Image (tube, rainbow, N blue to C red):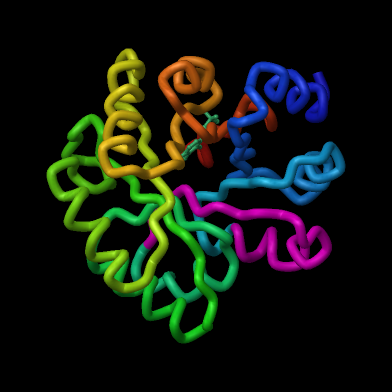
Amino acid sequence: MSLSDNLQDIRSKIPASVTLVAVSKTVDEIRLREALAAGQTVFGENYVQEAKSKWTALKAEFPQTKLHLIGHLQSNKADDAVRLFDRIDTLDRVSLASALAKAMTKQQRKIPCLIEVNIGDEPQKGGCAIAELPALIDFARGLSIEIKGLMAIPPVDKDPKPYFEKLAALAKQYQLKTVSMGMSGDFETAIACGSTEVRVGSAIFGARTPKNAQ
Ligand SMILES: *Cc1c(COP(=O)(O)O)cnc(C)c1O
């Protein structure tokens, strides 16, 4: 199947109310252009440097494009991230909120954020601990950062459903509208659990090479 067939197939499985974020890490410009030509407007990238080199010119050419940062963000890259991205989906700590707020003020460019939650309470993973979520939301809002919702990646090799349900419940508890969860292998389950936004990479662009699989 071609890339546009893949996109059509996935769109047919997603209700219109759910946003499809095409995850394009490691994807080259030729295939990005194919996705853009097929009408895809929302893209997710994991690395600031990679996104900068691939998207700076393309975004100017396709101004309706919305770029989400879905990978871990180091505070020293906050400035670059705020310049390029339309949303940061991986805000997970107070120090990063401070760095983002500073970059937004400096550039006079306000972009909304999602808070990434360590939904499986995994020590090796990024994401805000569930217990620290209300404090981080308050802190970020105190710096005038708009918090639109929550994002999470459930533990690998476990049934994702209880984790999806938990994230949706947390979003409800804190009255946050956007719930970013679900990837190529589990987006339909995520939608059934209340996802408003799915992040699909390999099912659109094909398998990534192991070196770049992240
Ligand atoms: C790579 C990635 C995805 C997409 O994964 P696929 O299994 O290729 O759909 C989604 N979310 C995040 C945070 C990712 O890093």
Q: Is residue 25 above or below residue 83?
A: above
Indicate the position of residue 8 as horizontal and vertical percent values. Answer: 77, 23
Figure quadrant of the C terminus: top left
Q: In which quadrant of the rendered view does residue 176 lie?
A: top left
Q: Residue at x 50, y 55 (%)?
A: 47
Question: Image quarter for residue 181?
Answer: top left
Please provide percent x and percent y for residue 192. 47, 16
Image: 157 above or below 19: above
Q: Position of residue 188 (x, y in %)?
A: 53, 16
183 inside magenta stretch: no
* 13 and 213: which is toward the camera: 13
Percent x, y of residue 30 = 81, 46
Residue drawn at x 29%, y 42% is 117
- Where's the N terminus, which quadrant? top right
Q: Residue at x 76, y 56 (%)?
A: 64
The magenta stretch is: 51-73
What residue sits 74% from the left and 62% below the top? 59
* Residue 67 on the magenta span: yes
Give the residue furthest to the left. Answer: 131
